[in-house]
Image: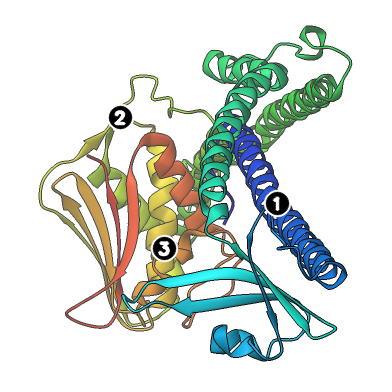
Amino acid sequence: MQSRRKLRFRLVVSFALFGFGLSALFAVASLYVRAKVEDQLVVSALQHDVDQAVNQIIAHPDQQSHSELLEAWFKSERTLYKMPLAWQNLQSGVHDITETNADGTVKHYKLAVRRKDGIIGFVRYDVGREELGKRQLITSLIAAVFLFSLLSLAIGLWLSRKVLKPVTQLAQRLRDFRKAGKAEPLAANFADDEVGELALALDEYAARLTAMVERDREFNSDVSHELRTPLAVVASTTELLQGSPDLTPKLAERLKRIERASRQATELIEALLLLSRAERRGPTRGETTDVGKVAGDVIESQRPQLRGKPVEIELATNEAVSVNAPASVLSVALTNLIGNAIKYTLEGTVRVEVGKGRIEVIDTGPGIKPEDAERLFQRGVRGEGAGGSGAGLGLAIVRRLCDLYGWNVSMRPRSDANGAIASIVFD
C-alpha cells in the first residue's frame, strides 16, 4: 500500500531520521573507540610499570620499589603464598580479575603480573575509576545526539520548504485550475528545471486532451445531426403510411413497431449525447416526466421481444411519480432494465411497480448472486442465464445516466422466489 503522507512530511522525517542515525552511530563509535584505546593504554601502562619495578628490584635488591600510578606488590617464590590464591598461578601479562566481596559487591580490576629471576611483581588497577568518566561521556553523547536530531529536524523543515516550493506552487495552481474549471499554461511560471519540465508536460497533455474533447464534441454533433435526419424521414414516412385508407391491420401493427423503434433510436441518441458531454448535472430544460407513462410506453415497445414466451408483463402504478428529466433519458434506462428482465425470464411474469419515489422491475428469471449485483453495472459484464447475446453495455449506460441525474440504480436477488429486482430510486 502506497504512503499517503505529504512529500514535505516525508522529506522532513527523512532528514530527522538521518541526523539521528548519524549522530547515534557517531556516539556508539566514540564509546567503542574510547573503550578500546583506554584499554590498550591501561594495559600498556600496567605492563611497563610492573616490568620496570621488577627490573629495579633485581638490580637493587636493597631498594624498595614503588609504583607512582598503581598498587604494587613484589614477592619471591618463597613468599608467594602471602598473596591471594587467585593470583598465585597467574603467568606474566595483564589479566582481568572479577571478585565478589563478603558483602556481595562485585569488584573488577586489572592485574599485571611479571615473573623474572625468582621475583614476582603484581600491579593492580581498579577499573572502577573509569566508570565516572564513562558515565560523563555517555551523558554528553546522549545530549549531543538529541541536539543533532533537533538540528536535523530544523534543517529538514527549512530545506523542505525551500526545495519543495516550486512543487507546492505547481500543486496549488493545479488545485486552482480544478476549482475554476479552466486550465491556463503552467510552464511560463516555472524555471527550466525538473518542475518546469513537469509543468510543460502537463501543458502538452492538457492541450492534447482539450483537442481530443473538442473533436469528440464535434463528432457527437455531426453524428447527432446525421442520425436524426434519416430517423426523421423514417418517422414522417411511417406517419404518412399510417394515414393510408387501405392499410391492413397487420401492416398497421408493423408500422406502429417501426414508429416505436424510430422513437427509441431518437431517445437513445439524445441520452448518449448527454453522456458523451460528461456534464456534472443532467440538463432538464424544465422538463417534468411522468414515470408511470414512460414505463407504460416502454412496456408496449418491448412486448414484441416476448417472441411467444409464456411471460406476462404487468404495470402497477401505486402512486404517481414525476422526475425533472427528459423522457428520453428515463426511457433509455427503463428500456434496458425491462428488456433485460424479458430476455432472462423464460416463463412467469415481469412486473413493473411505480411508487414511493422509485420504480422497480421484478422478474421470475434465474436471478443473480448477491456478490454479482454491483459487478453487473460494469462495462462488458453480462448476467448468467438464458436469453440471447449482448455486449454487456446496457446496465453500464443505465448507471451513467442515473449518476448524471442523481438517481440510485441497483439490482438484488428476490428473497421470496427466483428472479431479480432492478430498481431506480429518484429521491
Q: Secondary structure at mark 1?
A: helix
Q: Amino acid at mark 2?
A: Asn
Q: Which residue is mark 3?
A: 374
Q: Which residue is mark 1?
A: 34
Between marks 1 and 2, how big is the CA–CA gap? 84 Å
Give x and y (percent) for residue 69: 67, 53
Secondary element at image label 2: loop
Circle 3 crowding by C-alpha within 10 Å: few under 14, some 14–19, many from 20: few
Quarter of the image containing the N terminus? Answer: bottom right
Q: Quadrant of residue 73?
A: bottom right
Q: CA distance from mark 3 to mark 1?
A: 69 Å
User: Residue 410: image x %, image y %?
Assistant: 34, 58
Question: What amino acid does circle 3 point to?
Answer: Glu
The three-letter amino acid code for the residue at tag 1 is: Arg
In the rendering, which numbered label is found on residue 183?
none
Q: Nearer the viewer, mark 1 or mark 2?
A: 1
Q: Residue at x 63, y 30 (%)?
A: 152
Residue annotated with mark 2: 324
Instruction: Give whichever of 39, 189 is nearer the camera.
Output: 39
Where does residue 112 sit, x and y in percent of width and height? Answer: 71, 72
- Considering depth in this image, is 122 or 140 the residue closer to the camera? 122
Residue 42 as seen in the image, left or right of residue 265:
right
> Mark 2 vs mark 3: which is more N-terminal?
2
Q: Is residue 49 above or below residue 355?
A: below
Q: Are marks 1 and 2 in contact (CB under 8 Å)?
A: no
- Mark earlier in primary sequence (1, 2): 1
Find out whether the residues at labels 3 and 1 contact each other: C-beta distance under 8 Å: no
Q: Residue at x 84, y 12 (%)?
A: 191
In which quadrant of the rendered image does the C terminus lie? top left
Of 326 and 422, which appears nearest the observer? 422
